[in-house]
Structures are given as C-alpha cells and as structure tokens.
Image: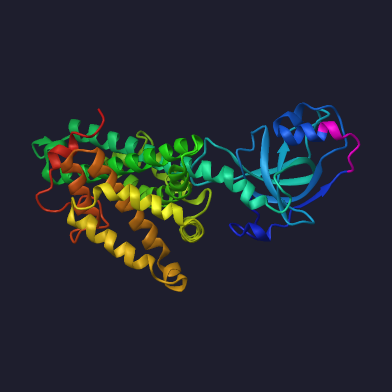
Amino acid sequence: MTEKQGGSDVRSNSTRAAPLAATRAEPLAAARADPLAATQAEPTGDGWRLTGHKWFCSAPMSDAFLTLAQTEAGLGCFLVPRFTPDGERNAIELQRLKEKCGNRANASAEIEYRNAWAVPIGPPDRGIATILEMVQQTRLDAASAPVGMMRQALGEAWRYAQGRHAFGRPLAEQPLMRAVIADLALEVEAGVALMLRAARAFDGAARGDEAERALARLLPTLAKYWHNRRGPGFMAEAMECLGGIGYVEESPLARLYREAPVNSIWEGSGNVICLDVLRVLARHPSALEALWQELAPARGQVRELDDALGDLERLLEAPPEVLEPRARWLTQRLAQCLQGALLLRHAPNAVGEVFCRARLGAEASPAYGVLPSASPVAEVLTRIAP
C-alpha cells in the first residue's frame, strides 16, 4: 500500500492500473474466482498492467502481493503474482532491501511495477475496503506479536533474577526487583487476555455470531494500539533487570528491544489506529454495544474500573471535534478497561484487582515497578510461566 508521497494516506497513491483487452474470457473468470490460480493459468492477454513505485513492500519473497493502484473508477485492489500466467517472471523490480532498525529476519523492499501483470480483487473503486479485510487480520497479528515478545522478555528477566545473587541474596528475593517483575507480569497477563479475546471474536465472526463480528471490528484495533504502546518500555525495563548483559547480544533482550517498535508502525501507526477506532464507533454502533456487554459482568467489582467506565461513557457523548484530539486517550482507556474486566473474570481475584488499581486508579504510574501499596506481589509472580 505504501508510497513515498502518501504513507498512510493511501488515497494519494499514484501507481496506475490499466486493463488489457480480453482475448479469452475463461482464464480471466477463473483468475477472478481464484486469484492464486492465475499464476498457473494458460497464457492469455487478460488481466491488468500496473505501473508505479511502492516505497515499502513487506515480505518481497512472497509468491503474490496485494497492492493498491488507481483505475479510472477509483482506487482498486489487485493481486500481483511473482510469475505471469505464461510462466515468465512478472515485471516487479526489487530496487533495494530496507536497512531497518530491527525485524531483520523478515525482508522489506522498495519496488517498482514496470507494467506488471495483475488481476483485480473486488470492485475497481473499493480497493481500500477490500484490502482492509486483509489488514484487519494482520492487525490481530500485530496485536499478538508484542504480547509474545513481552512474555519472552519477562521470562528472561525472571530467570536471570532467580539465578543472579547481589547483596547477599538472589535478585528474585529483593523487594524492589520483585515489584518490577510483578508489574511486568501484570502487563503480560493483561495482554494475553485481550489478545485471546480478540482472537475469539474472529472465531465467533466466522461462525456468524453478530455480537462477535461487532467485537472483531474493534478489539484488534484496540489491542494493536495499546500492546505496542507498552512494548518498547517493557523491553527496556526487562533489559535493565539483566543489567549490562541485557544490553549486549549474548542475551535476546537487545533484539527484542529493536523489534518492539515495528508492530506499532505496520498496518497503521498510532494516530491512524486511534482514528480508525473513532471511525468504527461512529459507523458501527453495534461494536460499542458489544463492548459494553463484554464489560458488564465486571462492573461493581472494583471501584477503579467502575470510575474509569463512567469517564468513558461521558467522553463518548462528546462531539467529534472533542473526541479526535483525545482519540489516543480514549483508545488506551478502552483497552485498559477491557483488560481489567477480562482479568477480573478469568484470572485470580487478586490479579484482576491489583491490575485495576495499578492501571486505572489514583496510584497508577506510567513507569513499571510502581505498584499500589499492599499489592499481592507473591501471587502475581506465581503467574509467570516456568
């Protein structure tokens, strides 16, 4: 999707698509029914030709690419295979591989379409809506990956703390270190709960459950934004738990730290994601209704959660010109409230309650390791996977 002059503003894309004169209808019809089969079709003049530059192409080693290009009808979505139907390499020039901060194991490239053969996917003027069906799936990936990385970093920090002795006893017995790692464990617990709930919404939508379909419109977006906001700071804190060894390549923390920002940028950076939350809430009221239903069983259990939900209800009554500048706060709070509600329902009571106090209450801190007084640190630490 990404072009250098537009970035997230894909409507400004300049790549052009032009149809070829159909010489045989059957191969084109088959390609539209099964686009991947187009790479194995008989040679034909059917299809479209794409010309233009893409500043960012993820996974250029793939067999085919979904891409946006301008048509006479508007912005369309196309499938561009690596090989044309007659077996020739398609006219896709890989100009260079990107030298990225992290994510080195997954190549990204800058490419040029030089009259590349393609088949249309969806209506010619509905390219964004068509490709967003794929983006919504990969947003779930981008919401899950940071939680997996945080879980790995937590495991590394806790194992190190258990084995490392300082000032006469293991770090894992030092009260301040225990508070830091317990706070990290809370973040992982909440992230896993929200990520799995979003995945379950996708499963329910596939079964035709309308309430789950409504949640599937909203939850991956909330989770993608908030998990990736928390990830880089989490990795830095876990790295610090190891001290100097965490900063060198002998441990995986340095790689995790470099990897942490990428999922917040893929499939929509923070502002784009938060604006999309506002779009979903405005266009699909059923998504907000389904979210309130999901939160309802947790109401009345913890004062901090009830107060936060009341604040959200009042904010959501505001007009768009008030909501848009506060879209990040709204998205963050919706995600945190849902995390708290899920933990109150599915985790030990102490875990859910301390999460709500630590993230939603008056003692909440943006820094890790600043838990409210009398937090059940020992019980939280038992939740860390061995």
Where's residue 127, x and y in %? 67, 50
Magenta region includes residue 78: no
Residue at 66% from the left image edge and 42% from the top image edge: 66
Residue 45 visible in rendering: yes
Where's residue 293, x and y in %? 34, 49
Magenta region includes residue 22: yes
Residue at 72% from the left image edge and 39% from the top image edge: 80
Where's residue 296, x and y in %? 28, 50
Magenta extent: 21-27
The mark tally for this picture is 0
Q: Nearer the viewer, residue 173 or 12?
A: 12
Where's residue 248, x and y in %? 36, 39
The answer to whether 14 is drawn above or below residue 106 in the figure is below
Residue 233 visible in rendering: no
Residue 371 lies left or right of residue 248; in this view the side is left
Which quadrant of the rendered structure holds the C terminus? top left
Residue at 82% from the left image edge and 31% from the top image edge: 27
Q: Quadrant of residue 310?
A: bottom left
**How is the protein colored in the picture?**
rainbow
